[in-house]
Amino acid sequence: MMYQPVDYPWNDGFDFAAFRQQVGDFAELLGTAQLRSSFAFRWELITHLARLYASGTQMPPYSPFMPDEADDGESVPDAAVDPRKAKYRARHIRHIGDTVEACMGDDDAYHGVTWPDEDTVEKLTLSGELAWIYSDLLKGAEEWDQGRLDDAASTWVYGFEEGDWGPRCLSVLGCLHFYAGDRMSLLVGSTSEAWDSVSDQDAASCSEVSFTGTLEIDQAMPAD
């Protein structure tokens, strides 16, 4: 009797290191929202969120790394929780949400439905949902940067399947599609109001910003 190979809907060879870079790119976009017009920012958000969600669908439902081991096989101890670092991290995430809210303007608020309570409509904000997504992804990024590869992969996989970043990412994508604006209007005439709000100076500033998404909290925290 011949057994047919199982065609699993994921990639057993998923590149978590490449996903870590995607998280960094997403963090850079959120951290520089104030340098973009709301029109440009929304369409860039769609691109980044779609890429992150597509990557989530390819993650295997398990971590391919040995528990608490780095690439060289040496055990990596759990990082002690630094209260000062945790406090700064919370302030940073709130700042990201405030930055996105300022960029989104009146379109920040929207109504969403959370499964399985389909009859309950919630008033949400794009900035709040994006802050949740960022926080969830960032936790895995911090674990990855500490060499805790198994923890990082597990955080990202769980966050996509049952946690915050996967479902919220899909919800925000649906909302952004209607709020982003009509790209076809850019083809009408040589100028567009959507791009007039972005000055040459802002565009130059965007190219000079470096935001890795790792926070580098140890360097950013004030000294005692």
Image (cartoon, rainbow, N blue to C red):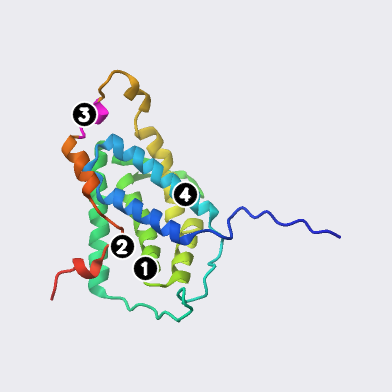
Q: Which residue is drawn at 49% across and 53% down?
A: 56
Q: Which amino acid does label 4 sit on?
A: Tyr
Residue annotated with mark 1: 145
Q: What residue type is labelled 1?
A: Asp
Q: Is residue 196 magenta?
A: yes
User: Which of the two marks, 3 or 4, is nearer to us in this view?
Assistant: 3
1 or 4: tag closer to the N-terminus: 4
In the rendered view, tell whether residue 179 sits above or below residue 116. above
Q: Can residue 107 be seen?
A: no
Residue annotated with mark 4: 53
* Location of residue 81 (image quadrant): bottom left
Q: What residue type is labelled 2?
A: Thr
Q: Which amino acid does label 3 sit on?
A: Asp
Residue annotated with mark 3: 196
Image location of residue 136, percent across then percent down: 38, 59
Image location of residue 174, percent across then percent down: 43, 39
Element carrying mark 4: helix
* Location of residue 64 (image quadrant): bottom right
Identity of the residue furthest to the right in this view: 1
Element carrying mark 1: helix
Q: Is residue 153 magenta?
A: no
Instruction: State whether the magenta stretch is mostly helix, strand or loop.
Output: helix
* Location of residue 135 (image quadrant): bottom left
Q: Which residue is drawn at 35% across and 37% down?
A: 43
Instruction: Measure the C-alpha gap from mark 2 to mark 3.
Output: 32 Å
Q: How crowded is mark 4: few (under 14 residues within 10 Å), some or many (20 or more)?
A: some
Image location of residue 18, percent across then percent down: 44, 57
**Quarter that holds the C terminus:** bottom left
**Nearer-the-camera pick, 207 or 16:** 207
3 or 1: tag closer to the N-terminus: 1
Q: Give the range drawn in magenta.
A: 193-198
Instruction: Measure the C-alpha gap from mark 2 to mark 4.
Output: 20 Å
